[in-house]
Image (spheres, grey):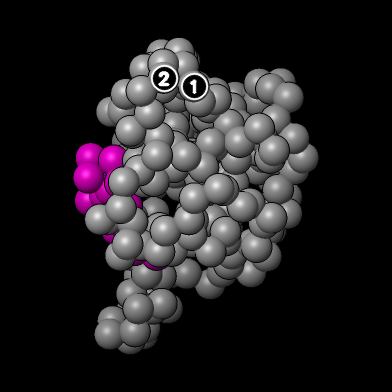
């Protein structure tokens, strides 16, 4: 695969750089509503029931590195309904759980928002059209990931963030960005010791091991797509 340069990050005033932990980060993200995943499926979603047009902003006013917490339940649900098959390494219940427990990383939250917003009624709620909103969430994800894209923390959250960003680039028809994010994701996977050999030894009945197998399988498929387009 030929090396391609990453697109420059836009300069949105979205706050500080994300600091990763080994898998999840406990941010002080405290939306005024919070439902456990099972309750959320039955409870009314505030963002969807407001009668006031343009009453919401795209981002959390208190922590602008995050999407607006009132919009995230809808985005997560739409993400898994419309494209969950492409991201078998993520699960609806776990993602909703991480939102509820405030451990969902800002980068992944923005990536989910960027992919899901095109299927939403965000313009009615925010006054921003879906294409512009998708670009804003994409830019926010890239900025929050950090400026040194080749020196990232080595963990599964980082790997999943890169894979989601690669898919966003692919959806936007940006082959060079797609190839570059796939390359960087493969380097992170290598440092995590993910390979055909290692994942083959994982216990498929263990949820964590199954997620790692699904991560590797999805990454290989994306890498193959990027190689064909190189």
Task: Identify the image quadrant of the C terminus.
Answer: top left
Q: Is residue 134 visible?
A: yes
Residue 212, magenta (yes or no) = no
Q: Which residue is mark 1?
A: 55
Along the viewing direction, whichever of 26 and 52 lies nearer the viewer:
52
Q: Residue at x 36, y 17 (%)?
A: 124
Tell me where residue 145 sits by quadrant. top right
Query: Dot 2: what SS?
Result: loop
Per the rendering, the mark at residue 52 is 2
Image label count: 2
Spatial CA span between label 1 and label 2: 6 Å
Residue 92, magenta (yes or no) = yes
Picture coordinates of residue 86 (x, y %)?
Answer: 27, 48
Picture coordinates of residue 131 (x, y %)?
Answer: 40, 16
Q: Is residue 130 visible?
A: no
Along the viewing direction, whichever of 12 and 89 lies nearer the viewer:
12
Q: Describe residue 126's horizontal placement relative to residue 201 as left or right.
A: right
Q: Is residue 175 above or below residue 106?
A: above
Q: Residue at x 53, y 72 (%)?
A: 193
The crowd level at tag 1 (other Cα within 10 Å; few <14, some 14-19, many 20+) is: few
Which region shows up in magenta?
77-94
Q: Are marks 1 and 2 in contact (CB under 8 Å)?
A: yes
Along the viewing direction, whichever of 82 and 214 lies nearer the viewer:
82
Q: Residue at x 35, y 78 (%)?
A: 207
Q: Residue at x 61, y 36 (%)?
A: 60
């Amino acid at each position: 695969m030929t090396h391609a340069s990453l697109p420059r990050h836009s300069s949105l005033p979205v706050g500080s750089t994300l600091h990763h932990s080994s898998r999840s980060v406990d941010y002080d993200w405290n939306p005024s509503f919070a439902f456990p995943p099972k309750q959320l499926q039955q409870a009314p979603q505030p963002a969807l029931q407001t009668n006031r047009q343009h009453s919401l902003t795209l981002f959390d006013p208190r922590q602008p590195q995050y999407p607006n917490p009132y919009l995230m339940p809808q985005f997560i649900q739409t993400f898994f309904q419309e494209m969950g098959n492409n991201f078998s390494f993520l699960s609806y219940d776990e993602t909703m759980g991480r939102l509820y427990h405030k451990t969902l990383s800002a980068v992944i939250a923005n990536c989910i928002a960027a992919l899901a917003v095109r299927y939403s009624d965000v313009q009615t709620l925010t006054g921003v059209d879906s294409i512009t909103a998708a670009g804003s969430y994409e830019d926010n994800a890239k900025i929050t990931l950090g400026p040194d894209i080749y020196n990232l923390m080595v963990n599964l959250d980082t790997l999943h963030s890169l894979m989601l960003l690669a898919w966003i680039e692919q959806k936007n028809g940006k082959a060079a960005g797609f190839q570059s994010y796939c390359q960087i994701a493969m380097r992170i996977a290598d440092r995590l010791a993910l390979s055909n050999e290692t994942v083959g030894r994982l216990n498929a009945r263990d949820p964590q091991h199954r997620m790692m197998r699904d991560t590797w399988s999805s990454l290989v498929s994306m890498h193959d797509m990027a190689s064909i387009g190189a």
